[in-house]
Image: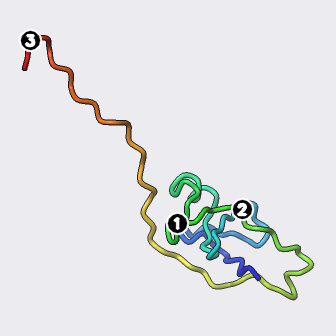
Amino acid sequence: MLELRPNCECCDRDLPPASPEARICTFEHTFCATCAELRFDDVCPDCGGGLVARPIRPETQLHRFPASLRRVLKAHRPATPILPPRREPEQPAGWV
């Protein structure tokens, strides 16, 4: 059963059990949609797996199977930016 962690592991944003903003990987590393998309390009910075929308546990099941209260917060580096190819400076005609 999914742990349903209560926060983004990167920015500590609250992610309640019914939040459509929660993203997880197969190891349940949990991030908000903003960090997942903009910082990590939907790739988990911890395991390299894909980050997808976390399923929402029906409210009727939360009393029997509650969400986790354990907050996880780690320092994460942003995804490596994609830089344009490096261009050699143009030299005037006749220069060697």
Quarter of image, res 78: bottom left
Residue at 50% over, 71% down: 46
**Percent position of residue 34, x then y:** 60, 55
Compared across the picture, whether 59 is left or right of 1 comes to: right
Whole-angstrom CA distance, mark 1 to mark 3, is 50 Å
Residue 94 appears at what percent x and percent y? Answer: 9, 11
Count the marks: how many?
3
**Circle 1: is it few (<14), some (14-19), or many (20+) Cα within 10 Å?**
few
Check disc 3 and report its element: helix, strand or loop: loop
Write down the residue under mark 2: 53
Q: Position of residue 3 (x, y in %)?
A: 71, 81
Badge 2: residue crowd in 10 Å (few <14, some 14–19, many ≥20): some
Residue at 82% in and 86% down: 65
Q: What residue is disc 3 on?
A: 94
Q: Residue at x 78, y 68 (%)?
A: 55
Question: Helix or strand or loop: what does disc 1 sit on?
Answer: loop
Residue 66 falls in which quadrant of the image? bottom right
Pointers 2 and 3 in contact (CB under 8 A)? no
Mark 2 and mark 3: Cα distance apart in space: 58 Å
As drawn, the label of residue 75 is none
Which of the marked residues, 2 or 3, is nearer the chain's N terminus?
2
Report the side of 20 relative to 48 (left or right).
Answer: right
- Return the disc, 1 or 3, that comes first in the chain's sequence: 1
Quadrant (top left/top right/bottom left/bottom right) for the N terminus? bottom right
Mark 3: few/some/many CA within 10 Å (<14, 14-19, 20+): few
- Dot 1 and dot 3 residues touching (CB under 8 Å): no
> Which image quadrant is residue 17 in?
bottom right
Tell me which amino acid carries mark 2: Ala
Looking at the image, is 3 positioned above or below residue 80? below
User: Relative to the observer, which residue lies in front, 42 or 68?
Assistant: 42
Q: Which amino acid does label 1 sit on?
A: Gly
